[in-house]
Amino acid sequence: MEEKRLTEKESLELIAGMIRNTKSKLEIGDGNMLLFWGYLSIGVAFVVGLAALLTRSPQCNWLWLLIPIIGFPLMKYWERKKKSEMLVSTYVDKISAGIWKIVGGLGFSGTLMCIGFRLFGYNVWQLMFIYPFIIVGFAGAVQGVVIRENSLIIGGIFSIIAGGFVTCCCIGGIPLSMDWACTLFIFCFICMAIVPGHIINNKAKKQCLKN
């Protein structure tokens, strides 16, 4: 059986169609991961804030470790399940996965540093409070650029600015009171995870209805 050769025009149309499909996928995206980390982080922040309000003990900060302890195993399970159902992994999918792997690696390294300094009598846990504002916010903004989602870009930028404010407080010796610090943390995750996650999923549903 003789193979059919594509003409130059047909080749260009095929490439254009592939680009259009890729753009459509990127615009739709998948907000489930954002919602997962967003709701988990907000829930833990609420628990930390409530515990601090009731006990007034700095030991409550150890509760922040619930985010990686709960989050990473569930995320790995979710990723394995998604990979088994995914037929094609695009270059952009790999970029997105790489961004969040770097974020996870930085979070793990930061936690080890904080624990190490604590063993020598130094309390530097402010680092891990600043981390989600700036590092996660920056990653969210970059992710928004990659998938062309403005709500993710705006939320990420807002979180970076909030992280700059918190950093200035730490450098200036202004105490990070749980009353306002946890509230700011929760608000940032609403802006950079919850809102974009629901917007992306809503776009996906509309796309499915059109198809």
Image: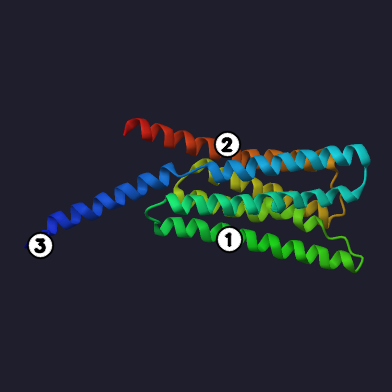
In the image, farthest residue toward the left: 2
Disc 3 versus disc 1: distance between alpha carbons? 43 Å
Where's residue 186, x and y in %? 71, 39
Determine the image quadrant of residue 72: bottom right
Name the residue at 75% across, 43% down: 44
Q: Give the distance between the C-alpha atoms of the residues marked 2 and 3, in whole angstroms.
A: 50 Å
List the residue tagged with mark 3.
3
In this view, the residue in front, 127 or 154, is 127
Q: Say whether residue 98 is left or right of residue 185.
A: left
Residue lying at 78% horizontally and 66% vertically, measured from the top left: 113
| Residue 167 pos. (x, y %) | 76, 54
Q: Nearer the viewer, residue 205 or 153?
A: 205
Q: Disc 2 or 3, which lies upstream in sequence?
A: 3
Residue 63, x across and y down, in percent:
80, 48
Q: Is residue 206 above or below residue 141?
A: above
**Residue 195: numbered disc:** 2
